Image: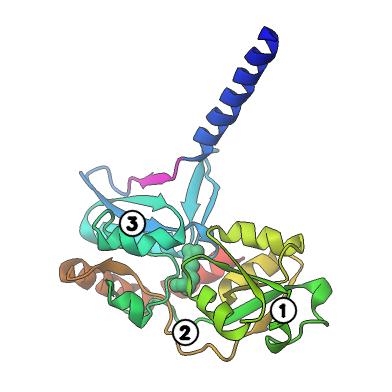
Amino acid sequence: MKKFSLILVLLVSIVLLSSCKNSSNVFDFILDESYDSFVTMATSADYAPYEFIEEGSDGKNTVSGVDIEIAKEIARALGKNLRVIHKNFDFLIEDVRSGKVDFIIAGITPTPSRAEIIDFSKSYYTEESVEQVVLIHEDNAAAYATVESLNTTGLRVGAQTGTIQVEFAQLFTPLATLKAISDINELMNNLTNKQIDALYTEGPVADVRINQGAPFVKIVLDQALDYEGNAIGVKKGNTELLAVINSVIDQLILENKITEWLSYYSA
Ligand code: ARG
């Protein structure tokens, strides 16, 4: 019995320790040794090509993607190092509203209701609107060829908590059962394993998964085109920071950097 409890304690500690190791959600980037402070940005790093967790050259996890490149440029323009905090998407708006972080970049669509809570930069997305899609398992491509065919009682559709995709799911497939979870990686796995039948997401994110070999096909949601690109969020009234951010965006667009990063991180 004693031996059994000892083993149990050991097992529990191993589980706890290993989860601690992976739960570091703060990533510091020293951009210049002479900078003496950090600017803090929050994101939800489950969204390649915008932001994702990967193994860095030192073997430790790091956060990468188009949005991280943009954040580094903003930090440089401010003469500060960059601290990136990775958390669930549905916390981001509140974190910047309350001043917990300086800005948020997470492939965020600047919707009118969000713009009542925080201020948005100009769009940094190079096309007018981001393609909205629904992903289907390739085995079901023939059965569900249109969004209308997904509006069926008993079907399970997924979307990331707090995103506009939840609204699309409610709008376009109200008869289906909505499974909203905070981690889009988990939703992608659910679709691979057919635990859900469809997943609402965005074109660039869908394309990365398909290019990586995920067994998905996409249905383009032409019905959902009125949203304009992606923007960076700051606390309401923080015009000083917003001006710096907007000029960094102008410069990056001028130098074609965003397009370059998009194709680099989509490959
Ligand atoms: N563009 C969508 C929205 O703003 C989804 C963004 C999800 N971003 C992420 N990093 N997971 O609601």
Amino acid under disc 1 = Thr
Q: To which residue does mark 1 refer?
A: 153
User: Quick one: which residue is furthest to the top in this view?
Assistant: 2
Q: Residue, x 32% and y 73% (percent of image)?
A: 249
Q: Nearer the viewer, mark 3 or mark 1?
A: 1
Residue sitting nearer the eye, 50 or 13: 13
Determine which residue is flagged by label 2: 127
The local secondary structure at tag 1 comes to loop
Mark 2 in CB contact with mark 3 (< 8 angstroms): no
Quarter where residue 215 is shown: bottom right
Question: Which sits earlier in the primary sequence, circle 2 or circle 3?
Answer: 3
| Mark 3 residue type | Met
Is 7 on the left-hand or right-hand side of 264?
right
Q: Residues within 10 Å of mark 2 (few under 14, many from 20)?
A: few
Instruction: Say which residue label 3 marks.
Output: 41
Within 8 Å of ligand 1, the CB of disc 3?
no
For the record, the magenta segment spans 24-30
At x 48%, y 55%, the residue is: 64
Q: Amino acid at mark 2?
A: Glu
Sequence-wise, the earlier of marks 3 and 1 is: 3
Q: Is mark 1 within 8 Å of ligand 1?
A: no
Q: Secondary structure at mark 3?
A: strand
The disc, 1 or 2, on the residue closer to the chain's N-terminal end is 2
Check the image and tell me how it is coloured. Answer: rainbow
Residue 93 at x, y = what percent?
A: 34, 64
Q: Is residue 129 left or right of residue 117?
A: right
Label 3 environment density (alpha carbons within 10 Å; few <14, some 14–19, many ≥20):
many
How far apart are the two marked residues, 2 and 3, measured between alpha carbons?
A: 24 Å
* Residue 25 within the magenta-colored segment of the rendering: yes
